[in-house]
Image (cartoon, rainbow, N blue to C red):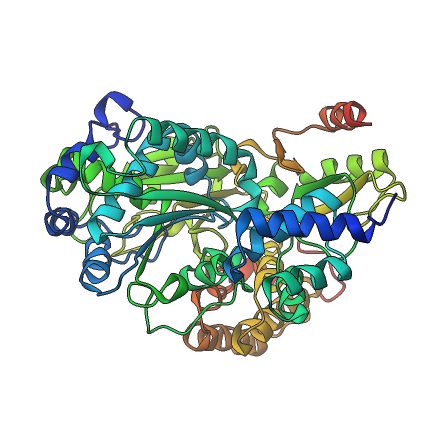
Amino acid sequence: MIYPDKNVIVSEVEHLVEKYGFGRENLLPILQEVQRKFGFISDFAMQEIAHRLDIHPVEVYGVVTFYSFLSTEPKGKYVIRLCKTISCDIAGKDAIARTLERELGLKFGETSADRKFSLEFCHCIGMCDQGPAMLINDQVFTKLTPSKVIEIIENIK
Amino acid sequence: MPIINDTIFFDEKAHGEALEKALKLTPQEVVMEIRESGLRGRGGAGFPTGTKWMLALSAKADKKFVVCNADEGEPGTFKDRVLLSEYTKLVLEGMVIGGYAIQAQKGFIYLRGEYAYLFDHLNTYLERMRREKRLGNNILGTNYSFDIEIRLGSGAYVCGEETALIESLEGHRGEARNRPPFPVNTGYLGYPTIVNNVETFACAYIVMSKGAQWFSKYGTEKSKGMKLISVSGDVKKPGVYEVPFGITIKELLELVGAEEPKAVQIGGASGICIPMSEVNRNISFEDIPTGGSVIVFNKERSMLKVLRNFMEFFVEESCGQCTPCRVGNKKLLEGVELLEEGRCSHRYLNELIELGKTMQIASKCGLGQSSPNPFISIVTNFKDEIMSNSIRGNNGK
């Protein structure tokens, strides 16, 4: 099931609002959990959250589109973010980028058709002393080499 | 000659007990101790911490907040990650001390989304503090109660700016506010709020534990204490270094084993790039201020490629709210492209430098005001290299 059922979203949002509270200041934690659970924040989910928090859906849309870790389009189960900032670049980011593209059959910015992988660049992830580095969801991988990347991808696949 | 081999952060036995000491004093006395130490904000801007806390203490409100800025997004900076993961006590108890000093009831750690893997570790530590009565109701048997909640960021560099961070905490887009009013008066949900860097709280802990006198022995006249520096790039020993303020770039390069350096970027993407002829300058608020990022480039590196990397960063991370930053950074990036193609005349380059200076004055927040720094310093300090591309193009090599 690629697009979650509306009832599932309604009950999830209800649960999250109960957990965090009705105040606007709880919008970001709620959005982060929806993103984590469904891989994206659909129009319907945004409307439902807005309704529950008693704010305009456009307010929610504005927030979702501002933050790079929140998305309105479905993302893969594993979101791979390779750091492209200068320290990781110097350390050999390009070879890692080519390996990832080749092994996943994806270009940067794409999500695989089976929604397993999304491949993205990101800015500095604070691993500059151990570059090149990447994040897979919340996990960090450092001192990458092409063969290390192949191993990591094989383990997930 | 600065004392280089001393360490306070990395020697747990030397940390002492700051919370016990602080809670025996009045909030005013804690603030005075911090003021006397000369501690200045470690995020890079260097606002005197004692003054910030005093303003928040004297603000009248029924609620006050403490925010720990753990949105460490500056390229090349990773000292906060090390503090949060390995010296957690310094940071979290430093927050409790800050809370007591301004009489706040609640604190937030705004942890960047990229560091989400530290969330569980921090939460476990908070739980432990609550069990040991170092957090929660009646801390250490006193009348003071304070609790800390962790909030995650979602991948926006601009949220490291304090008012953008507060906007984000309130559930909005991370767009900077006009200042004044300052957060010490009108912060989170309109209540007085102090926003301090992770390292600042750790320093506050050390000041309370060791005393203001001890702390102000280190450093220079206007930059007291020690600074954590994150070193990366072309060096033998990358990592986090603890150095006293006033250390020269030359001394630092020797310490970290720089390999045939050509340029040193100090302060991350929003910092400045200096050539080897200026390595006798020092790291301090008087000379080169920094949040702690040092990136070394060797002779092989193309400075134009470095500059492009930084400009792409700012174009993508500008929140788009104010024109000088939104449009200015785009123009500077286009300038880099012209330089790569060898089509940027000297006259146009000077116009771009003037544009950069306008952005420094006219942008709304720190991001826009500092974003032209790498452009101006790289094209000024490495002009011959930057202007050497032919019109046929050799891609900055």
Residue A55: quadrant of the picture: bottom right
On the rendered image, what quadrant is the N terminus of chain A found in? top right
**Image point 78% across, 36% down: which residue?**
A100
- Pick the front one: B112 or B101: B101
User: Residue sitting at 42 percent across and 64 percent down?
Assistant: B163
Residue B3 visible? The answer is no
Q: Where is residue B219 in the image (x, y as percent from the top left)?
A: 20, 43
B128 over B1 or under it: above or below: above
Residue at 14% over, 46% down = B30
Viewed as shown, does residue B206 lie left or right of B120? left
- State left or right for residue B55 relative to residue A72: left
Query: In the picture shown, does residue B271 fall above or below B148?
Result: below
Instruction: Give above or below for A15 relative to B55.
Output: above
Q: Where is residue B342 in the image (x, y as percent from the top left)?
A: 68, 66
Pick the front one: B314 or B164 = B164
Which quarter of the figure is the C terminus of chain A placed in? top right
Q: Nearer the viewer, residue B231 or B9?
A: B9
Residue A54: give x, y in percent of width and height: 60, 67
> What number of labels is visible?
0
Q: Residue furthest top?
A: B13
Residue B57 visible to an observer of this rendering: yes
Examine the rendered structure and indicate whether residue B317 appears above or below residue A111. below
Q: Provide residue B358's location: percent of width, then percent of height.
A: 46, 78
Q: Is residue A67 left or right of residue B47?
A: right
